[in-house]
Image (tube, rainbow, N blue to C red):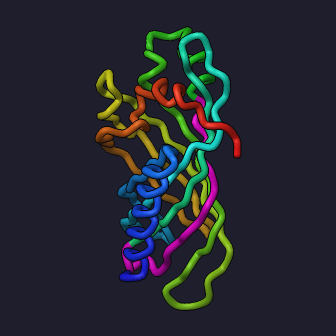
Amino acid sequence: MKKVLAVVLLSCFLAVFMSAQTGISVSTGTSALAVHKDGGWGVASMTYAAVPVWASTADSKGNVNMIAARADAFMPSSAMGFNYYGVGGTFTPTKWMASVLSKTLIPSDSLQFGLHASVGSYMPTIGTARPSGLFGVTASYALNQSGSVVCNVVEAGWLNPGVTYVSSGLKFYFNSPQAQASAKSLRRTRPSLY
């Protein structure tokens, strides 16, 4: 556990350092999850760091679709008997969602949908580490105009071999360009593919 904590802290430090030195927007977060494996339920935390790498052209209201590189650390309680570390990406189709929501009464800045996937290492407590992958979806709704308070309606996913997870709850963004309803602010410094 000490090694995991050291890796997470080092990743957060490097993310903050990179952001300060290069102006690149880095978001980090942790989700508390309910995990189902081998017929039983447990708890886990998933810590992630994401860096935007591409944004589409903006629509007339400034909405864009965005892709971010992402690193995951999936750490269940020790009773579950494994950890997972992976790298991959996140796709947030805000522009497409705004197009669909324009025909409804739901404000397009409020509802957000995202997909994330990673490949990495499934590390059992006993036994040999093996290649694995994680796939998840998130649907969330901003509760205030600035997007700093968000209801994570559902976050769910699957981790090979046979692990499913689900989460729901509130997210709070403090002075973050990743706040959900302020996605337009990211468009001012639109990242390019590199």
Looking at the rendering, which quadrant does residue 75 occupy?
bottom left
In x, y percent, where is residue 111? 45, 26
Number of residue marks: 0
* Front residue of this view, candidates 109 and 18: 18
* Front residue of this view, candidates 6 and 107: 6
Q: Left or right: 150 with respect to 74? A: left
Looking at the rendering, which quadrant does residue 93 occupy?
top right
Q: Is residue 87 magenta?
A: yes
Q: Is residue 84 magenta?
A: yes
Q: Residue furthest bottom?
A: 127
Whether residue 157 is situated above or below residue 173 in the rendered picture = below
- Residue drawn at (48%, 66%), measured in percent from left and top? 74
- Residue drawn at (47%, 64%), measured in percent from left and top? 36
Q: Left or right: 121 with respect to 172? A: right
Query: Which stretch did the figure color magenta?
Result: 77-93
In x, y percent, where is residue 126? 52, 90
Whether residue 151 is situated above or below residue 71 in the rendered picture = above
Quadrant where the image shows the N terminus: bottom left
* Front residue of this view, candidates 190 and 87: 190
Identify the main secondary structure in magenta. Answer: strand
In x, y percent, where is residue 154? 43, 42
* Front residue of this view, candidates 7 and 170: 7
Looking at the rendering, which quadrant does residue 129 occupy?
bottom right
- Residue drawn at (40%, 50%), measured in percent from left and top? 167
- Residue drawn at (43%, 35%), measured in percent from left and top? 140
Q: Residue furthest front?
A: 21
In x, y percent, where is residue 132? 65, 69
Q: Left or right: 188 with respect to 141? A: right
Whether residue 23 is situated above or below residue 44 in the rendered picture = above
